[in-house]
Image (spheres, grey):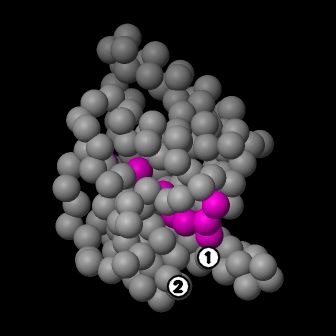
Amino acid sequence: MSDTPAEKRAPCIWVDADATPKPVREILCKAALRTHVHMYFVANHALPLPTLEWIHSIQVAAGFDAADHHIAQNCQPGDLVITQDIPLASEVIDKKVEAIHPRGEPYSPQTIRQKLNMRDFMETLRSSGIQSGGPAAFDQKDRQTFANTLDRWLARSLAARSKQ
């Protein structure tokens, strides 16, 4: 069996795992065990993941956005993508795939353009030498927000699957 899903399949979760916090990976693995939803962790390095039939590790070649490209090419409508990468979130939203940030914030067609513009603005500031600081440390509130957002998606996905 391949680590990449077949053409028509049940919805699954794609994780842009290169920068996903460990607590998010743990939440996802527990959810895979509980719900039997396939999860594909895509990274350019090996990840410590439990050995379960619903958890798949896909190691892509090192290179700029290699994991993002793999996810964008393989996700399908009905899937969920977990990513901090705003351009990837925009690309999968265009494919009618849901996306959420590891801190639990859903990306949407209504907000993604603003997030892309802010990302570009901050990148321009950094390239001109202005230090903007990084994101706050991932904390318990972020963990809970992510778990709640994931649970809502899983409930919708499993309900839709049971109607088929």
Horizontal side, residue 155 vs residue 118: left or right: right
Quarter of the image for residue 151 reads bottom right
At label 1, which amino acid type do we have? Leu
Image quadrant where one finds the C terminus: bottom right
Q: Please name the residue shown 37% across and 11% down the image.
A: 128
Image quadrant where one finds the N terminus: bottom left
Secondary structure, mark 2, is helix
**Residue 35: numbered disc:** 2
Q: Determine contact: label 1, label 2, CB under 8 Å.
A: yes
Q: Position of residue 69 (x, y in %)?
A: 45, 37
Secondary structure, mark 1, is helix
Asked whether 128 falls inside the magenta stretch, the response is: no
Task: Work out whether residue 148 or residue 49 is closer to the camera in this orientation and state it.
Answer: 49
Q: Position of residue 4 (x, y in %)?
A: 44, 56
Q: Please name the residue shown 19% across and 55% down the image.
A: 46
Q: Is residue 66 above or below residue 164?
A: above
Task: Work out whether residue 134 or residue 84 is closer to the camera in this orientation and state it.
Answer: 84
Q: Please name the residue shown 23% across and 35% down the image.
A: 62
Q: How far apart, in angstroms, are the residues tagged by discs 1 and 2?
A: 8 Å
Task: Work out whether residue 113 or residue 16 is closer to the camera in this orientation and state it.
Answer: 16
Residue most extreme to the front? 1
Chain part drawn in magenta: 8-18
Q: Is residue 18 above or below residue 163?
A: above
Q: Residues within 10 Å of mark 2 (few under 14, many from 20)?
A: few
Dot placed on the residue nearer the N-terminal end, 1 or 2: 2
* Location of mark 1 (residue): 154
